[in-house]
Amino acid sequence: MEPVSGPHLRIAELPFLTQVDLRVEPGSDTAADIALALGVPLPTEPGTVATTDGGASPSAASASGRQVLWLGPDEWLVVGPPDDTGLEAGLRAAAGTGHAAVTDVSAQRTVLLVTGRDARDLLSHGCALDLHPRAFGPGRCARTMLARAQVVLAAHEDDGFRIFVRSSFADYLAAWLLDAAGEYLGG
């Protein structure tokens, strides 16, 4: 997808991010070892994101840091830059013989980036979540539906959102976003 920009909206793809699904018992020694290897505690509050660089920028993991998105009581999505080839192996090594599941899901989803002052309004057209910054501000994430496609939505600073969508729905969702953004892209 070619990036599209307007005065207060930008839509782009963040291609080839490394994505690893992690399942481990929170509070266990194995979870602690994994958190130590990542350099950040696994978030235990529902719908939160932890970053290894301390920021919540939408492009943080695409630059140098990693993000850990809470997906369930014992499930996280660990996201790293495209060339983070050691992420899966590092998590497996940290888990050792403990009870954990580490699965590379990089090819399962693509990531779309929607940023700018109009991003929340655009996403509200197709998402039932309350996207107001008080309810869904930076450092929050959720599995939800966006324009009838299942996504993981993560909010970041500067009115930015990452949308993790299954590859089979990526073209549909990109087309929907571009169509819905028509009113925001004009001068």
Image: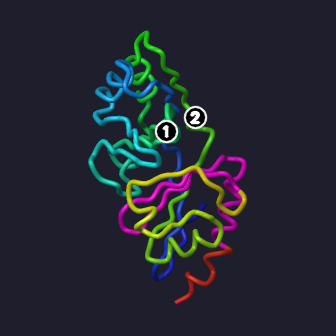
Label annotation for residue 77: 1
The residue positioned 55% from the left and 57% from the top of the image is 112
Q: x%, y% of residue 51?
A: 34, 45
Which of discs 2 and 1 lies nearer the camera? The answer is: 1
Q: Is residue 93 above or below residue 49?
A: above
| Cβ–Cβ under 8 Å for marks 2 and 1 | yes
Where on the picture, by quarter, is residue 105? top right
Find the residue positioned furthest to the top.
97
Query: Is 159 on the left-hand or right-hand side of 119?
Result: left
Find numbered disc 2 in the image and state the secondary structure of the residue it sits on.
Answer: loop
Label annotation for residue 105: 2
Q: x%, y% of residue 97?
A: 43, 9
Q: Is residue 45 above or below residue 148?
A: above
Front residue of 85 and 169: 169
Q: Amino acid at mark 2?
A: Val
Mark toward the start of the polypeptide (2 vs 1): 1
The residue positioned 49% from the left and 38% from the top of the image is 77
Q: Amino acid at mark 1?
A: Leu
Query: Is 9 on the left-hand or right-hand side of 108?
Result: left
Q: Quadrant of the N terminus?
A: bottom right
The residue carrying pointer 1 sits among few (fewer than 14), some (14 to 19) or many (20 or more) residues within 10 Å by Cα, namely many
Q: How many marks?
A: 2
Distance (Cα) linking label 2 and label 1: 9 Å
Front residue of 161 and 133: 133
- Magenta part of the protein: which range? 149-178
